[in-house]
Every structure is written in structure tokens, then in C-alpha cells.
Image: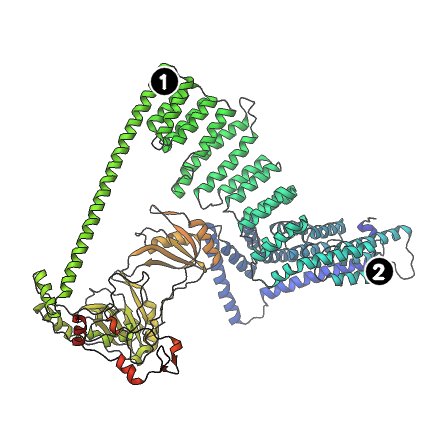
């Protein structure tokens, strides 16, 4: 039995006490709000220093607020800028500006649970009049539409309790509680709080109905008490039928409240709910231990609920998943598709579609489904049009998305037209929309993406079909097809045949014949097929003159096509023949070179150089080449052992020196040998990738590095000929200066990136690598490819800074400093980087279409280690090949007789080498095998037959 607030508060014993309690709670809440505001503003007894500091902070905050407002005026969709502005305004107590900033952000984005709760609490503190309370109610209604949040619903219900003293307040609060149970009452972990709050509310009302001591209730009063008891009993029964965590406690509370054993139906509902909770408990536990955003766990949970088939539980698990994965378009698409096909409840379906496009506005598929849902549920034409206009401004990432959107909207407009009438407002609106769509794609989209996204003119084709089939206006259809052909489609047979079929169905034979004749002349991809169609048409429709003309035109066209193909084939054959002749000449040259080398090998070592000199006609004396295993000249072996760890062998062969070589050696002799002291590695940096032609490297590098500290020595590395090798050592007086100098790594010098790295002995640390950039996923950084080589850092910075605050722009170059067309842009946070990807991907920069993605470099390949022989006497490194394997000219310069088989670990025990028979070898046998041989010994072995 229902009762009004006046009837409830007519009982002096309980009602007045409950009403006084409500007023006291409201007074205490206002007092706490006033105290909090006073604490925020600060007391008037602060010292002068504190007041000065506060004044400076206020000035800084005001400047920052002004900067954020200017930034939002430029880029209204900067999410983080909105959040920072709201935070500062709330800190400064600018209530009106704060309210305005929150309203602007809520119009563009769905707000998070934290933002809504802060906003609601601020408005509740400021609400004093009845009209203010209504505004808070309206704000709550907006908050519950963004996401399904149990905390917001609980706050909403508790706030409504404060208004039960007003007319209709109790029923309003009860209605809000009922809606909260419908929305989040099935939430297995957080829904129980709503149920308990609702029962406490109803118990409080029951307390107002209890009689005072010694008084007796009338029959009407007893009926109201019984009705209230029924409400509480119903709440218990409903809650016990829902699978929630800690159901056992609720069941115990119900038995204590009822003061008797529950009925059999209630017990059965409770047991069934316990079984359902047991089935879902593993999924809840997986969500509890998983890391956000828990998408895989939610997907598994959704699959389970879809098989179970309970619509309410399917909806609540979707809502829970979307609250933590609001930027996953596939999840929104799956949810809205389920609502469209299964529930089909207008308010629920349209609300889900609206939230989907607000969270993922860049997905055209969500907008198309939203338009269809609005039409399906008979929304007003004005609302559908406004939704379409919002979609046009959503900022899709490719031109074809806009074509799909226009097609969806034009389909809707076509379904509104009654084509039985010759003319109507809907038909004119459809034609106007077709015209606007074509112009929009031609102007706006081509300017933005460099293409219309509709090369086949599908929108114009649909327009022509509608005019021909539905409006019976073939003249308009022919004009549209003329526009289609002038857009570069006249050379394709399928386009002519599409037009011919339209004329065949709705036109006349004369225009069909004219279209096929033009197709025969213009088609370049399948001319035979078009000719066959023309002849087949004349067999059915044409006269003898028409047939003769068609045969003549088709034969002439096909003969011309065959001639063109023959010329192309002859040209291709000629090119193939020329390529084969070039290949034969290359093979011949290679065979001649091999024969010449074979003759040289058969000559004596002393005669080889003489043969070379006679062949070239001049005497060119060079140092002898060493093996390709990485040996350097003898003069550099000791100096560069720290960097390359190679072992060379001195060549005792005497070489005749020319005057030019003697001059080069004289220059080299004036250079000091680079002797590096390993004990000073902490004070030294290694500088490489310098230009070989750099004049006076010492002076040039000193001018660059002296800004970091006093320099002790600069040691460039020169070859034996006195040429600068492009790298050097820079030694400082202090370790801090060497550390600071590393900041110059990859700075451009004479058009090349200069590499500055710590000085590390790679012989002792072979795995040491210097790579200053991360090789893992960086969500705040974007990778840009496809840039023109002429694009500068400043130009790219102008493009990127429109989408957020940049921290760094880095153009990727090769070792010579030439750009690779790649770049990295680092933003302050992940949201700005994501916004940059959405806006910049597919953008055209200097006629180049760039690709933009979140930076996620591939894992760097681990280079294989150089393994040395296990025997103590061997110093030869094991061969390590490059990425392409062993090259054709990568010859082993060690005679086979000296090459030793690898020793397996099974034959080595405690440092003693054993042969295949298991016999140990002594030190003498090992020394005999590793005995060094002279050049004369090698010559004897090579010439021995």
C-alpha cells in the first residue's frame, strides 16, 4: 500500500525525529563545506612571507590558466589540456570559470568517473536553493549517461535522500534507487552497495512508522507499516536472487530480519544464485588479478555471458568492459550490434550508439551504425541530419571513410522519398545532398588527402541509377555518366558496360549503340570484350547498315590494338635480347678475369708484382693486403686494439717504394702514434663518423668540446699514409666533463652525425653497445615514415606541434648525414601521441603521403660472439659471417693443413686435451701442432706438388 510524505510525517513520535535527523545532516554537510572552503582560501593570520609566496603562486597559476585557455582556443580536442585547466581552476576557486570549463569538456568528451564525482561534489556544496538542487539532479542525469558507474549511482541515490522532506521527495528517491538497481544492481562486485543502501533507506522510513511506547496503530497505519515491511521483504528477495559476492552475509541478515526461516521459493532463488555466482567467480578472479585494461579477460567473460543468454547480465558485463576499454572500437561495435539485433530497446540502443561515437569518433563504422539506429527507431529528420554533420567533423583518417559516410546518409535520404510523385521536397533534398557530397569529396577531401576517395565515382553512379530507375529521368542520368567518364574512367571497359546496361534497361537503342561505339574507341583494357558486346547488340537490334558499320569499327579497332601489342612485344623482345647480351658480356669478362688471376697464381711470388706493374703500365707500390678477417696495417694494430680487438701479422715482404709513397710516409711519420691509456677511460670519449676530409681535426674538435671542461689531449687517428681515418680520442681533465660531452652524440658536423660514445675496451667488454634510444614500445612517442628527404626538422615540428606539446623531434639519417625519410616525435603524454596518430596518419607533406604510428621499434638482432680456440696456443679467431653469410670472395688464407678441427667439450676434461681415442695429449704435442711458421714455410707448402 502506498502512502504520501504527509502521511508518513504525521506520526509525531517517529516522523519528527526522522525529519530532524535529515535537517541536522544537511546542516552538518553545509558546515563541512564552509569549513573546507575556508581551508582552501586560507586564514587571514598568515605571515607576510606566506602571503607573498601565495601571491606568486596565484600569479603563476593565472598565467598558466591563460595559456591553457589559449591552447584550447587553437585545439579544442586537446583532452589533457582540458583536464589541466579544470584542475587549476578548482585549485584557485574560480567557480564560474570552472563550471564553464567542465561543461565545454563534457560536450566534447565523455568524462571519467573521477571527473564527474569532483564536479558533482562541488555543485552539491554550492547548492542551497531548491532550484540549485534541480540543477544538481540534471547534472547527475548527464553523468550516468557517459558510463555505467556504481559509485556515481550510489552518490545520486544518497543525494536524493536529502530531498525527501520536499513534496514527492520520497517517491523520487525511491525511483532513483530502482533505476540504480536496474543499471548496476547486477554488478557482481559493486552492485551489493546499491542493494544495501536501498534497504537502509526503506528501513529508515519504516522507523518513522513505528508507534511510540504505549500507543496503538489504527488499521490504516497498520496497513502502511505492513506495506513498508513488504517492500523490505521484496528487496531482500530480489537481492538473494542475484548472483553477488558475499551473498551468504545477505542471507544471514535476511533470516535475522525476518526472525524465521526463509520460505522455500526464497531458498531456491538463493541456491540458484549461488550456483550462478560459482560459474562466474573464476572470471571475476581473473579480472581481479589482471593488469588494466583487462581486455582479454573481459572478452572471455563476455563470451561466457553470451552463451548463457541473459540479456541483463550481457549488458552489465559489456558496460563494465567499456568503462575500462572505452577507446576500443571493436568492443563498442560488438556491444551496439548485440543491442540492435537482440534487445532493440530505443533508449538503450541510441544511448549506446551515442556513447560509442563520443569515445571513438574516428571510426566511420560506428557513425554509420548510429545513423541506421536513428532511422530504425524513427528519430526525427533533424536529429539524423545533425548527427551526420557531427560525423563530417569527426576527423577520419582516410578519404574512403568520408565516401562511406556520405553513402550511408544518401541511402537514408533516398528511403525518405516517395518516387510516385513527380516532385517533392524530399526528392529535391536528396538531389541537393548528392550534389553537395560530390563537391565535398572533390574539394575538401582532395585538398586534405590528395584524393577524393571515390575514383570509380560510386556516388555519381548511385545518383544516376536513382534518376534512371526511380525518377524516370534518363536525361539527368546521361549527364551524370558524362561527368563520370570525364573523370578518367573512359578507358575502362567495365565503366562503359555499366552505362550500357543502364541505357539498355531504361534508355533506348540509339543511345545504347552510341555508348558502345564510344566504348570501342576509348577502351584500352579489354577492347575485345567491348567489341563482342557491340556485335551482339547489333545482331538483336541493328539493321544491315548498323551491322556493317559495327564490323568495320571493331575490325579497325582490333587491328590497331594488335599493331600496338606487336610493337610493344617487339620492344620487349629487343630489351630482353640486349639484357641477355649484357649478361653474356659480364660472364665473359668474369671468365677472363678468373683466367688472368689463375695465371698470376701460377707465377712466383716475386714475379707477381712485376706482372701487375707491366699490366697497368706504371709502377704503383702499395702495402700488401692482409686477410679479410679484419686485420689492419701494422702501424695501427697496437693503437687500435682497444677499439677493434683484431690481431694482425707482420709482413716481412719488402716493397719497392715510389716517390709518392715515400712522401705519404713522410707525412705519416710526422703524426704521433695514438697510444691510449686504459686507466683514463673514465676521462675519455671516443668520437667517430667524422668526415675524412676534415682539416685540422684537433682544432675543430677542441672548439666543440672545450665548452664541457678543460681538455687534456685530443688524439685523432691517421693511417700509414697520413690520412685522417674519421675518429679520435678526446681526453678531459675531469670525469664529469667526459660524461657531459656524451650529450653531443649524433650532433651534425659538416653534414654528418658525429657519434660520441664512452671509451670502452671492447676486447674486455665485447658485448658493449651504445644505443641511446629505446627499442621497446613508447606510447608517448610516434614514428613517422614516408617523409620527403627535403623535409627539415623545423617544418616537421610545425606539423606535429598542432596536436600536442612536443618534447623532441628527431630526423633519422644514415652515417653520412643524409635523411632516410623517417622521424620520431616525442610528446608529453600518451593521449597527445594518440591524437597525433589519428590526425597525421595519411597526411600529405610535399606530395608525400606519410604514415604515423606509435613508436614500437623491432628488437635489435644479437650479434654472435667471436669464439676463440680453446687451446692456449691458438690466437686465431673463429670466422664470423655477416648478415648475408659468407661472401664469394671471402677466402680463408690459412692452408688446410694448418686448419684444426674443432675440439668438442666431451674430449676436454679438467684442462687436458684428449684425442678421438680418449688418449690425453701432453703440452709438447699441443705446442707442435700450434708451432708458428714463417713466410718461407708457407711458400714451400703452396708450391709443393
Residue 722 in the figure: left or right of residue 678: left
Q: Secondary structure at mark 1?
A: helix
| 59 relative to 340, above or below | below
Of 760 and 200, nearer the camera is 760
Residue 698 in the figure: left or right of residue 854: left
Within 10 Å of disc 2 (Cα), the crowding (few <14, some 14-19, many 20+) is: few
> Residue drawn at (61%, 42%), measured in percent from left and top?
340
CB-based contact (under 8 Å), mark 1 and mark 2 = no
Residue where numbered disc 1 is placed: 547
- Image label count: 2
Q: Quadrant of residue 449?
A: top left
Of 1 and 106, nearer the camera is 1
Q: Looking at the figure, which quarter contains the C terminus?
A: bottom left
- Could you say where residue 927 lies in the image, as x and y percent from the top left? 27, 82
> Residue drawn at (43%, 42%), measured in percent from left and top?
399
Within 10 Å of disc 1 (Cα), the crowding (few <14, some 14-19, many 20+) is: some
Query: Furthest-top residue in view?
Result: 544
The tag on residue 261 is 2
Structural distance between the alpha carbons of marks 1 and 2: 99 Å
- Could you say where residue 408 lies in the image, as x and y percent from the top left? 52, 37
- Could you say where residue 45 lies in the image, as x and y percent from the top left? 58, 70
Residue 114 in the figure: left or right of residue 707: right
Of 419 and 927, nearer the camera is 927
Q: Secondary structure at mark 2?
A: loop
The tag on residue 709 is none
Q: Earlier in the sequence, mark 1 or mark 2?
A: 2
| 738 relative to 461, above or below | below
Amino acid at each position: 500500500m502506498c502512502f504520501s510524505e504527509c502521511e508518513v510525517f504525521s506520526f509525531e513520535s517517529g516522523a519528527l525525529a526522522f525529519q530532524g535527523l535529515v535537517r541536522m545532516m544537511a546542516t552538518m554537510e553545509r558546515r563541512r563545506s564552509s569549513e573546507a572552503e575556508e581551508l582552501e582560501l586560507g586564514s587571514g593570520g598568515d605571515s607576510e612571507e606566506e602571503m607573498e609566496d601565495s601571491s606568486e603562486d596565484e600569479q603563476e597559476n593565472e598565467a598558466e590558466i591563460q595559456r591553457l585557455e589559449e591552447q584550447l582556443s587553437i585545439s579544442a580536442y586537446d583532452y589533457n589540456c582540458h583536464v589541466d585547466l579544470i584542475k587549476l581552476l578548482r585549485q584557485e576557486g574560480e567557480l564560474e570559470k570552472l563550471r564553464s570549463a567542465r561543461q565545454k569538456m563534457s560536450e566534447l568528451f565523455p568524462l571519467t568517473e573521477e571527473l564527474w564525482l569532483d564536479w558533482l561534489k562541488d555543485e552539491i556544496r554550492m547548492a542551497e536553493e531548491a532550484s540549485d538542487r534541480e540543477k544538481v539532479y540534471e547534472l547527475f542525469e548527464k553523468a550516468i549517461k557517459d558510463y555505467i558507474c556504481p559509485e556515481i549511482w550510489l552518490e545520486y541515490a544518497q543525494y536524493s535522500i536529502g530531498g525527501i522532506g520536499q513534496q514527492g521527495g520520497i517517491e523520487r528517491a525511491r525511483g532513483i534507487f530502482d533505476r540504480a538497481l536496474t543499471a548496476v544492481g547486477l554488478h557482481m562486485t559493486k552492485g551489493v552497495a546499491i542493494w544495501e543502501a536501498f534497504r537502509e533507506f526503506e528501513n529508515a522510513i519504516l522507523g518513522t512508522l513505528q508507534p511510540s511506547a504505549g500507543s496503538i496503530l489504527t488499521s490504516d497505519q497498520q496497513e502502511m507499516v505492513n506495506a513498508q515491511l513488504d517492500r523490505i521483504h521484496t528487496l531482500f528477495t530480489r537481492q538473494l536472487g542475484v548472483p553477488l559476492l558475499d551473498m551468504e552475509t545477505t542471507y544471514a541478515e535476511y533470516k535475522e530480519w525476518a526472525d524465521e526461516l526463509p520460505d522455500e521459493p526464497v531458498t531456491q532463488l538463493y541456491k540458484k544464485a549461488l550456483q550462478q555466482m560459482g560459474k562466474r567467480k573464476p572470471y571475476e578472479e581473473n579480472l581481479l588479478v589482471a593488469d588494466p585494461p583487462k581486455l582479454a579477460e573481459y572478452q572471455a567473460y563476455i563470451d561466457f555471458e553470451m552463451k548463457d543468454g541473459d540479456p541483463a547480465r550481457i549488458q552489465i558485463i559489456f558496460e563494465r568492459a567499456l568503462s575500462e576499454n572505452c577507446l576500443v572500437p571493436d568492443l563498442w561495435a560488438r556491444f551496439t550490434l548485440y543491442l540492435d539485433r537482440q534487445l532493440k530497446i530505443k533508449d538503450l540502443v541510441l544511448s549506446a550508439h551515442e556513447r560509442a561515437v563520443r569515445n571513438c569518433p574516428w571510426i566511420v563504422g560506428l557513425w554509420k551504425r548510429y545513423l541506421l539506429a536513428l532511422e530504425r527507431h524513427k528519430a526525427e529528420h533533424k536529429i539524423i541530419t545533425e548527427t551526420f554533420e557531427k560525423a563530417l567533423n569527426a576527423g577520419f583518417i582516410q578519404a574512403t571513410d568520408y565516401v562511406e559516410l556520405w553513402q550511408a546518409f544518401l541511402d537514408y535520404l533516398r528511403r525518405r522519398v516517395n518516387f510516385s510523385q513527380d516532385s517533392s521536397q524530399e526528392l529535391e533534398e536528396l538531389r541537393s545532398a548528392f550534389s553537395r557530397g560530390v563537391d565535398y569529396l572533390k574539394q575538401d577531401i582532395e585538398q586534405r588527402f590528395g584524393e577524393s576517395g571515390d575514383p570509380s565515382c560510386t556516388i555519381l553512379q548511385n545518383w544516376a541509377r536513382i534518376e534512371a530507375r526511380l525518377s524516370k529521368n534518363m536525361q539527368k542520368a546521361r549527364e551524370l555518366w558524362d561527368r563520370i567518364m570525364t573523370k578518367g574512367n573512359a578507358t575502362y571497359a567495365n565503366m562503359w558496360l555499366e552505362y550500357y546496361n543502364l541505357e539498355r534497361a531504361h534508355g533506348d537503342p540509339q543511345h545504347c549503340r552510341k555508348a558502345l561505339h564510344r566504348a570501342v574507341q576509348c577502351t584500352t583494357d579489354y577492347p575485345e570484350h567491348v567489341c563482342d558486346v557491340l556485335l551482339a547488340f547489333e545482331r538483336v537490334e541493328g539493321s544491315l547498315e548498323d551491322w556493317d558499320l559495327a564490323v568495320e569499327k571493331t575490325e579497325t579497332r582490333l587491328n590497331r590494338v594488335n599493331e600496338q601489342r606487336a610493337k610493344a612485344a617487339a620492344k620487349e623482345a629487343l630489351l630482353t635480347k640486349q639484357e641477355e647480351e649484357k649478361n653474356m658480356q659480364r660472364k665473359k669478362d668474369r671468365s677472363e678475369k678468373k683466367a688472368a688471376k689463375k695465371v698470376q697464381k701460377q707465377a712466383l711470388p716475386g714475379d707477381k708484382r712485376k706482372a701487375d706493374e707491366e699490366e697497368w703500365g706504371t709502377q704503383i707500390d702499395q702495402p700488401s693486403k692482409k686477410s679479410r678477417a679484419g686485420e689492419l696495417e701494422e702501424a695501427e694494430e697496437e693503437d687500435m686494439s682497444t677499439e677493434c680487438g683484431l690481431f694482425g701479422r707482420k709482413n716481412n715482404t719488402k716493397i719497392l717504394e715510389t716517390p709518392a709513397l715515400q712522401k705519404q710516409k713522410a707525412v705519416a711519420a710526422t703524426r704521433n702514434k695514438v697510444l691510449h691509456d686504459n686507466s683514463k677511460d673514465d676521462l675519455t670519449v671516443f668520437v667517430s663518423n667524422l668526415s675524412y676530409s676534415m682539416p685540422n681535426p684537433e682544432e675543430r674538435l677542441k672548439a666543440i668540446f672545450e665548452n664541457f671542461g678543460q681538455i687534456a689531449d685530443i688524439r685523432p687517428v691517421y693511417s700509414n699514409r697520413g690520412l685522417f681515418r674519421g675518429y679520435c680520442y678526446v681526453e678531459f681533465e675531469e670525469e664529469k666533463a667526459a660524461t657531459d660531452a656524451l650529450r653531443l652524440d649524433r650532433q651534425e658536423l659538416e653534414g654528418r652525425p658525429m657519434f660520441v660514445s664512452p671509451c670502452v675496451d671492447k676486447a674486455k667488454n665485447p658485448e658493449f653497445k651504445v644505443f641511446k634510444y629505446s627499442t621497446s614500445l613508447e606510447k608517448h612517442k610516434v614514428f613517422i615514415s614516408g617523409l620527403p628527404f627535403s623535409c627539415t626538422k623545423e617544418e616537421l615540428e610545425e606539423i606535429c606541434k598542432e596536436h600536442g606539446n612536443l618534447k623532441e623531434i628527431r630526423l633519422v639519417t644514415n652515417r653520412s648525414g643524409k635523411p632516410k625519410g623517417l622521424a620520431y616525435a616525442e610528446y608529453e603524454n600518451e593521449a597527445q601521441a594518440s591524437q597525433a596518430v589519428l590526425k597525421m596518419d595519411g597526411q600529405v607533406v610535399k606530395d608525400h603521403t606519410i604514415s604515423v604510428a606509435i613508436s614500437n621499434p623491432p628488437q635489435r638482432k644479437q650479434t654472435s660472439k667471436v669464439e676463440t680456440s680453446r687451446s692456449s696456443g691458438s690466437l686465431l679467431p673463429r670466422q664470423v659471417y655477416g648478415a648475408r653469410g659468407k661472401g664469394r670472395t671471402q677466402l680463408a688464407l690459412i692452408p688446410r693443413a694448418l686448419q684444426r678441427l674443432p675440439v668438442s667439450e666431451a674430449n676436454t676434461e679438467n684442462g687436458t686435451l684428449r684425442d678421438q681415442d680418449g688418449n690425453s695429449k701432453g703440452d709438447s704435442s699441443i705446442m707442435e701442432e700450434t708451432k708458428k711458421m714463417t713466410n718461407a714455410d708457407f711458400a714451400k707448402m703452396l708450391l709443393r706438388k
